[in-house]
Amino acid sequence: MKFTLSWLKDHLETDATLEEIVERLTMIGLEVESVDDKSALKPFTIARVLTAERHPDADKLQVLSVDTGDGKPIQVVCGAPNARAGLIGAFAGPGTYVPGIDVTLGVGRIRGVESHGMMCSERELQMSDEHNGIIDLPADAPVGTSFAAYAGLDDPVIEINLTPNRPDATGVYGIARDLAAAGLGKLKDGAVARVKGEGATPVRLAIEAPDLCPGFALRLVRGVRNGPSPKWLQQRLSAIGLRPINALVDITNYITFDRGRPLHVFDAAKVKGDLTVRRAKEGETVLALDDREYKLNGEVCVIADAEGVESIAGIMGGVHSGCDENTTDVLIESALWNPGNIARTGRELGIITDARYRFERGVDPEFMVPGLELATRMVLDLCGGTPTETEVVGYRGHEPKKVTFPVSEVKRLTGLDVAKAESLDILKRLGFTPQSDGDTVDVLVPSWRPDVDGKADLVEEVMRIHGVDNIAPQPLASHAAVNGKILTTLQIRTRAAKRALASRGMMEAVTWSFIPSAHAEAFGGGQPELKLANPIAADMSDMRPSLLPGLLAGAQRNADRGFNDLALFEVSGTYEGDTPEKQRRVAAGVRRGTAKLDGAGRHWAGNAQAVGVFDAKADALAVLEACGAPVDRVQIEAGGPSWYHPGRSGTIKLGPKVVLGHFGEFHPKTLETLDVDGALCGFEVFIDAIPEPKQKATRTKPPLALSNFQAVRRDFAFVVDKSVEAAAVIRAAGAADRKLITGIQVFDIFEGPALGEDKKSIAIEISIQPQERTLTDEDLEGLAKRVVESVGKQTGGVLRG
């Protein structure tokens, strides 16, 4: 939202400086984005042409002698046809930046004659598009003074960043109201006098979609003269980035920014029959004022005459009924539109206009008719004409919201000690109406504040006007216990998982929560309740059931750009349903090419191998260990979900029911669905499935307990069926004596005819650590016997001879 300082002072009586106004705007929540103090125009001065002689080597150039007010004439070469002795205009000397031509002037030679600057046209100073001659000022223009000050071009422009909940501040008057409430001046009376009309409006209006148009006001003005708008109006519109068009259009643009009330004008001669507000017919088209044709659907609200659509309601008018220099009779429209429908229509059609910006936030319904009266007054003043009476259709008046306001909430929610009288006075200055005077006050909300719904909104109003800068900094309250737990378990695990994966050479990625429908179905999703009703893009239609599709797509995008060997991870949410308990916290990662833990790519000592299932398994176990899962007690089962390779994947469990994650290489069909190729493996660990530790959380490490007795290692080789997993043998051997056996690892697997059909040998090394005494041969033999019995009982394995 842009406005000039003088424009603000049209509505605010204040002696505050520009700096004070800018600071206060930010303090009351209207954050200032930028301020253009027009310092770039300060070097331009008013100068008089003393003499004008023809250039010796160019028929269309003249050599001017220019007086800039210091008594030292300056030589300037000029090609303007209106340059002459005695002319007073705007002069730019060497070193001056000229914005209209984007050039910084210097001393130059033009056809052999030195030129020390230039006399400027209006286009060169961005005053208008006029470039047929240099600026010609009246004879009483003060030579030697600032041209910007003389022409009113030194008016600073302020731009504020509006939050979506402040429709009242989309007009300069609303901004002035806030500043006045904050004590920076007095708000001028903004009441609009009624303009008396002659006779009824001949064009009748019908509203066929009252849910989309709660009110419509219309008036005809006959006998207007539509030409350029006056200089002051053009300058204001140009200052905020709008191009002046003609008086009628400029008036509506001005009121849009002045009062936050968008209007539209129709050339009455081009409107056939009466007007109707209705939903567009499917496939109906309109050529809009941006010279683009839009195809409409049944959800778009339009204003139509007997021959078809004349305007996309609340967003943009049509070319057919637009006003031009031949317009003599004009229909002025001021209406109310459904904010949700305006926002949806604007987004579907890809149209961004100042009218849409305001209507989708909610305009003041009580200013619908006064806005029309204000526009009528400006049309009569600038274009002349005779108005008819105003016709209002559909509007039933505004019923103000009533909010119960416990005054003590200001202290509770903000920490500010604001007296009750001051709190209520602030609300009154902002236009609210307190209905009582107790500790709990019923407050009526003004029509221009549709964003205020509850007591917290009123607290915010009091806080921002009283001053956010008055909130004193307070130290955080200390916890009762030293090293007390602040983060939740899930937060701690999320950070631990990220740190663990980053330390393994993986790079964190942040992918979209929305993925294509085909990708969601390939990873177990695609349920109707997880499809977006209004996706931001066609290929972002479903909430993701897994992090892997986004990571795989990211890896492929990198590979397409030449980065073939990389490892990505993400710790975020996935969605198995549309209820909170079906959202999960997952750590997932993928490795591509040769991006292994110990390095990737080619090397003279030996090239790295392609990633595989065991790289993914190691990553998954590293995450579990970092998150505090009992990794020594988890079970690994062969196979995983359908998106993994059936023979090169695994499932990590804690007991028979708790699934902690999956890992493995991906199924070829999955990669084909995602249009991904290359050596790839991945994992996903369900952080929220890890059980809470039973012991009290502490950062203190447990004492290191070392045995004084020598550890012993024993090897066993068992012949088992080929279907028996090595993990089953390890679990069975460890169950023989959980105190003495401190470690088991597989060091050999052998298959051969000597073992028998469908048999294999699994050799394990068992680490035995006595705690109380040195073990005797009898102790070791007894332990070995228990190991053989346990393996035989649980797996059917026998000791290999």
Image: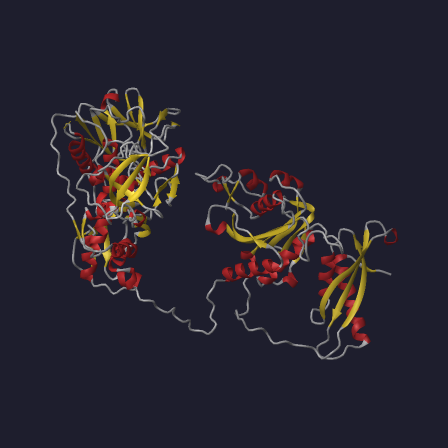
Which quadrant is the C terminus positioned in?
A: bottom right
In x, y percent, where is residue 67? 25, 44
Give the image's coloring scheme. secondary structure
**Displayed quadrant of residue 766:** bottom right
Point 48% across, 40% down: residue: 531
Left or right placement of residue 516 versus residue 665 in this view: left
Q: Position of residue 273 (x, y in %)?
A: 24, 20
How many marks are shown on the rendered structure?
0
Q: Position of residue 516 (x, y in %)?
A: 53, 39
For residue 686, above or below residue 231: below
User: In screen coordinates, is 118 left or right of 614?
Assistant: left
Q: Nearer the viewer, residue 153 or 744?
A: 153
Res. 439 in view: no
Residue 351 point in image, percent of width and height: 37, 35
Residue 426 position (above or below residue 203): below
In the rendered image, the quadrant that contains the N terminus is: top left
Residue 679 visible in the snapshot = yes
Left or right for 334, reference 35: left
Residue 231 versus residue 41 in the image, above or below: above
Query: With 77 as the anchor, is 674 left or right in this view?
Result: right
Please state which of residues 34 and 777 is positioned toward the viewer in this rendering.
34
Q: Is 449 in front, or is 125? A: 125
Q: Looking at the image, which residue sits at the far front?
A: 56
Foreground pick, 36 / 700:
36
Question: Which residue lies most toward the right here?
Answer: 754
Residue visible at 31% across and 23% down in the picture: 320
Q: Choose top left, top right, bottom left or bottom right for residue 772.
A: bottom right
